[in-house]
Amino acid sequence: MRLIVIFWLIGSLFFLYGQQLPWTTPQLLCDSTGENLEPSFARYNLINYNALVWKRVDGNTDAIYLKTFDAPNTEHLIYRAAPGVELRRPRATLIALDNWNSTLLIAWETNRHGNWDLYSALYHNGLVSDTFRITSHPSDDRTPSLADSEVVWERDGAILISRFSLADSTWSSETVLVPDSASSPAFIGYELAYQKGSGSSSRIFRRQRSSNGDWQPSELVFGTGENLAPEYSRGLPFTLIWQHRNSGNWRAYFRSEFLMTTDSLVLPGVDMLSPWALDPPQIPTRDYMTPMFLSFLSPSQQDGGIYVNDLPYNEASLRR
């Protein structure tokens, strides 16, 4: 079993980059029979706008669950696979807002037809729709990443994109954004990041989309050491965050467009794998930057739970 750790960070944390982070004692957020894996965050609504989506493995059965941070004791089953069928990389995005309640679009990859395809579903106010198939190509379609009503993913080294129509619950024809040698796409609507290469030659690239919808040429973000699993956060000081290693443990690296810097977050002696960040709903008035959720996978732990803990500010918890 493995542990997924979720932390609060305050925006002024850029003073601690590259130093040990003063975590408090974790509080259990998600635990059950089986393993709770692959967490991701999504905005939920304008008041309590954070949701957690994750995968649960119970014996030989995979399932995808969702919970909102305003109701942390309530789990919503999004989809349960048949025994022996795998589900991976659940992702969610806010696709519509109606009277303060949101509709979330959720996508994941599954091998239910033998190869890997992408599927999706809608969540609204406690209700879950039927599933909608995104891809049916004979090659494997992997690593979906969502923003607004669009999904990007990888197939045979190419990065593709499709748009979901809420009006008739259909997906558009796919378009190629990166033709070859790319993997691990991350998407924020106006920008796409991805990985090229492997091992010590692995690098992070990005493509930006202009206001008229045209995609600009790819550009290198970071190319020193090993660089894997890029993801986007939606708040300051992080924009693009990924897993980096020169030697020793993996750490979380980030590119802050606000500060125009690239730097690291370090938890000494711990591998920080698949980092993910999102700003939480409570923004203290004393801070000019938003606080942050930060999650990462720690393979050194063994209990298969999802945890949350606080970074204190002026001897007071942010969770109040």
Image (cartoon, rainbow, N blue to C red):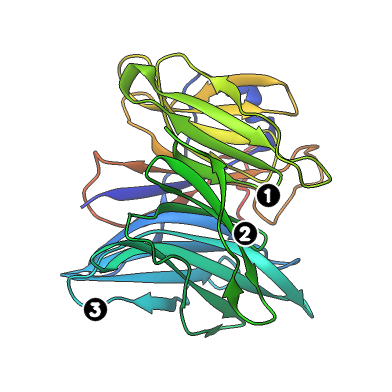
> Residue 82 has which mark?
3
Whichever of callouts 1 and 3 sits on the residue coming sooner in the sequence is 3
Image quarter in which the C terminus is found: bottom right
Whichever of callouts 2 and 3 sits on the residue coming sooner in the sequence is 3
Against 250, residue 151 (above or below) is below
> Alpha-carbon distance for marks 1 and 2?
8 Å
Circles 1 and 3 in contact, beta carbons < 8 Å: no
Name the residue tied to disc 1.
189
> Residue 120 has which mark?
none
What amino acid is labelled 3 in the image? Ala
* Place of residue 92 in the rendered image (x, y in percent of width and height, measured from the top left): 54, 62
Instruction: Please rate how many residues cluster around mark 2, counting C-alpha atoms within 10 Å: few if below 14, some from 14 to 19, many from 20.
Output: many
What amino acid is labelled 2 in the image? Glu
Q: Residue at x 43, y 55 (%)?
A: 39
Visible residue check, residue 131 = yes
* Place of residue 5 in the rendered image (x, y in percent of width and height, measured from the top left): 40, 47
> Alpha-carbon distance for marks 2 and 3?
27 Å
Instruction: Please rate how many residues cluster around mark 1, counting C-alpha atoms within 10 Å: few if below 14, some from 14 to 19, many from 20.
Output: some
What amino acid is labelled 1 in the image? Gly
Q: Secondary structure at mark 1?
A: loop
Closer to us: 171 or 138: 138
Visible residue check, residue 294 = no
* Place of residue 299 in the rendered image (x, y in percent of width and height, measured from the top left): 26, 41
Whichever of callouts 1 and 2 sits on the residue coming sooner in the sequence is 2
> Residue 150 has which mark?
2
Closer to us: 15 or 135: 135
Mark 2 or 3: the one toward you: 2
Q: Secondary structure at mark 3?
A: loop
Circles 1 and 2 in contact, beta carbons < 8 Å: yes
Q: Secondary structure at mark 2?
A: strand
